Amino acid sequence: MSETLHVDCLVIGAGPAGSAAAIDMARAGLKVLVIDRGEFPRFRIGESFLPRTKRALRRLGVLDRCMALPHARKVGVEISMGDHRYGSRTYFFRDTIGDGEKDAFNMARIHLDMMMMEAARDAGADVRTTCALRSIQSHGDNGIIANTDAGVVHAKWMIDASGQASSLGREFGTRRYHSFLQNVAYFEHFEGVIRPSGPAAGCFGLTVLDEGWFWLIPLDDQRTSVGFVARETLHRTLDIPAEDRFWWAVERTPIMAERMANARGPSRNRVISDFTYRCDPFAGPGFFLVGDAAAFLDPVWSTGLTLGLLAAEQAAAGVVRLSRGARPAAERARYQAWASRVVGRAFELVEGFYDPAFRDLLFAPSQPRELVRGFVTLLAGEFDAIQPATAMRCLALKSMCAVQKRFPFVPRRRPFRLRPDGVTNRVPLAQLASKVALQ
């Protein structure tokens, strides 16, 4: 029999962002209901985290619980071209400006999400899985009425942390896609992958192609997440079944063919579209959007979880202040300004990766150390409260990119191409399967 529930805040989504918001609000004494349409434990992509993520988890008091789970230490990023031309460039978090965390970690999301959901329950939130939001009857500064699988929920406020489902963005028609970042990812988990080694040991592996890029994320001592992100010009024209495209790309990319030569895992890949979008405005009468429900970015720099946790902290603080008499319009304006600024910085960082001038600077024969430190500080996820020293360095780097476009002062770096002649060649499935040992 359905219930009528009365709570202070309804949180849609029990992933890390929703759970983080619930933890803060429940600890502040609010009655919090978290609903999630999925069943836990569950598989999710997005396994590479940033030093700023680590600091956010420490603030929540869950870092020790997190580090007790299977994980791999992450010390930086190794960037290579697909055929290893120009060698590799390694950027270390130890060079981050300021006193923030100097390393991070990778972890299978099935572990992290379960831990965060349980931490929200431990904090006092009512968390219900396999419980979907069905519709919003009404929303405003006087409260929210929502139809859910648990019954009708009357809440004073609502936080949408529903991830790429973007429950409120779809409901209100505010989801807007990026003009050119409309990529698709093909990925799986493997054992026996050759990881970055030597000085780059412990690094996230990023392999650059003209048509996209590969990620290589160590998850623990044995398993590695490997994925191929195809740009729109490739995924819309490639005459290969979607579930075979990962190995198609691996076999044509020398550095990845080497690293996957002894890989053990599935012969066919999972597929997910990672179309970049925003659901602006990020706050409205009675609600806040956090994490992927607010904006989803191309995952090249692993910004997703960090943005989700930072936004959850800000939205939860707003709800707590509202519960203590703050003016709704002021809290909405505060959160909107914060989210627009932080999401905008993250978008600039992601868009820079696809800028040929920025790529030229990434692979330049020599690089000014202080400018590198500014770039690494953003890579570490420190885009919510940028210090003047970082801002100045990033502005200088942005100016250099603008100059490089018109008057190249470092060599132009053309990336490796999967299809140098622009023609798609079919690869027999048996040939693809021969490269991997089926589990």
Image (cartoon, helix red, strand yellow):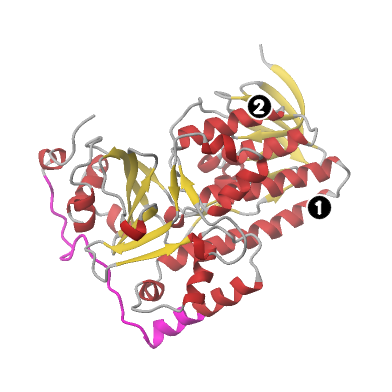
Find out whether the residues at labels 2 and 1 contact each other: C-beta distance under 8 Å. Answer: no
Residue pointed to by mark 1: 329
Three-letter code for the amino acid on which mark 1 is drawn? Ala
Q: Is residue 331 left or right of residue 159?
A: right
In the rendered image, residue 419 lying in the magenta stretch gets the answer yes
Q: Measure the C-alpha gap from mark 2 to mark 1.
A: 30 Å
Q: Residue at x 15, y 65 (%)?
A: 421
Q: Position of residue 317 (x, y in %)?
A: 75, 46
Q: Residues within 10 Å of mark 1 (few under 14, many from 20)?
A: few
Q: Is residue 31 left or right of residue 205?
A: right
Q: Nearer the viewer, residue 30 or 175?
A: 30
Magenta-colored segment: predominant secondary structure: loop
Q: Is residue 213 above or below residue 15?
A: below
Three-letter code for the amino acid on which mark 2 is drawn? Arg
In the rendered image, residue 414 lying in the magenta stretch gets the answer yes
Q: Residue at x 65, y 56 (%)?
A: 339
Locate the N terminus by quadrant.
top right
Q: Is residue 307 above or below residue 15?
A: below
Q: Position of residue 242 (x, y in %)?
A: 27, 43
Residue pointed to by mark 2: 121
Q: Residue furthest right?
A: 325
Magenta part of the chain: 399-427
Q: Position of residue 372 (x, y in %)?
A: 47, 72
Whether residue 377 is visible here, answered yes or no, is yes
Locate the C terminus by quadrant.
top left
Q: Residue at x 56, y 31 (%)?
A: 115
Q: Is residue 6 left or right of residue 42?
A: right
Q: Residues within 10 Å of mark 2 (few under 14, many from 20)?
A: many
- N-terminal of the pair, mark 2 or mark 1, is 2
